[in-house]
Image (tube, rainbow, N blue to C red):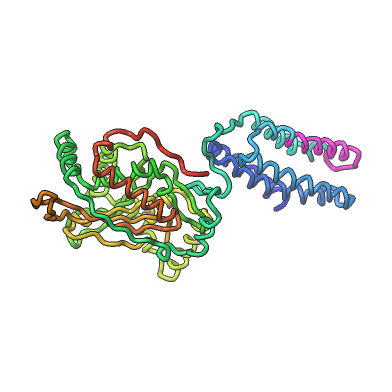
Amino acid sequence: MWSQIVLPVTATLLYVLIILLYGQEFFYKTAIPVYLMGIYYAIRPHILLPQLNPLVMGLYYTSLLFYCVLYTTITSGKLRYAWLLVPLHLAPVGAVVYLHQFLIGINLSRPAYLYVLPDYLLFGGLLILTLAIRIHPQGSYHPTWGDRVDGRRLRSLPPLSQLIPYLMPNRNGANNLFDESFEITHLERYIRQKRKEGLTDFGITHVLLAAYCRGIAKYPALNRFVSGQKIYSRGNDIQFCLTVKKEMRVDSPDTIIKLHLTPFDTCEEIYHKLNAAVMDVKHPKLDSTFDNVTMAFTMIPGLFLKLTVHLVKTLDYFGLLPKALLEVCPFYGSLFFTSMGSLGIRPIYHHLYDLGNLPVFGAFGCKRKVLEPQEDGTVIQKKYIDVKFTLDERIVDGYYYATFFKYYRSILRHPEVLDFPPAEVVADVD
């Protein structure tokens, strides 16, 4: 019953569910139920015809394996010809016809066609499905084996880059510290102008965040991350995490928001997205999804909680965590950015989290005034803010980071460029 009823029914239902729910992006996952059906067909001859020639059975098993492997190759996009599925599905139909004719000549308790009718329906349905398949446009990204729900695996990186995550498996053992000071005369002028235009809460946070997104438009490798000792790219999905106090009191609880930005966003668009997210979690009657999830975890007894965290880490290593859980967890994202200036202190170097895949943590402090001598002998007062970053060195090398931050500095000198989308967004490597 298990091999001839439960197994094929489960595989068929799984195939249908994958197509109906995730067929547009994750059609390649239909290879999983196909392999399950392969196991079913491998067992079936021993039940219907137990005394078959070993040579025939060897050819039969080879054909089954060839079918499963070729199906996986086609649906994963390695062979961009959906019509190849037509002869692939017609071949087993021929085998079913042969089996049908063979069963007719045997004295059976039921008509022969009842034994093969499910096979005719199965492969007939597969042939009809083949006509509905549409290939992703050439050059466009489509998920495939090895990718995660939150990023695509980079397969064309140099060998050393692919080896480094194995040599330095922990994020905190592979971080670099970077600090910079930015003169903010132009920034303050830009902020005052934006406030006059109606963006009443516009501040340095919005500019720094917008400049980071604009930097990723030119240097997309900053939006990579390491998971399962493999390097992935988030593409144009820049996931920004921020800790928010519901009230500015010592005993006020913290919560965390996650914001989805893109390299195309202007400063004003980021302002509206960020402010809307902050206002949502500051509502006194509501808790964020993050708060609810953490509350659920605290209800698990200590020993079982430790096992649960271990299970989460294991599933994450193999990229099996559901997207809904990744969405609410602040340890999965592109950038964690926090303002020490609102607390009236200098910025700190914040550690990265070994749980999750967050590669960058940034902090900026309060404004400070500096007296600087000029070439003509005069002394003028200037304002600066200090910014500190903790960076996962496994996603890019030091030269790439340095080039990015030079560009980041140039944007902050001319923040008005953030009023318009970038002229070009560079794509990361394959």
Give x and y (percent) for residue 297. 39, 61
Give the residue at the far bottom of this rendering: 303
Give x and y (percent) for residue 50. 86, 52
Q: Is residue 182 left or right of residue 167?
A: left
Query: Which residue is drawn at the image coordinates 30% and 36% (left, top)?
Result: 266
Q: Quadrant of residue 251?
A: bottom left
Give x and y (percent) for residue 322. 48, 50
Q: Nearer the viewer, residue 251 or 427?
A: 427
| Range of magenta residues | 88-111
Q: Nearer the viewer, residue 375 or 80?
A: 375
Q: Is residue 68 above or below residue 395?
A: above
Q: Quadrant of residue 294?
A: bottom left
Give x and y (percent) for residue 228. 51, 58
Q: Is residue 242 left or right of residue 33?
A: left
Q: Is residue 93 left or right of residue 141?
A: right
Q: Main secondary structure of the magenta part?
A: helix
Magenta segment includes 94: yes
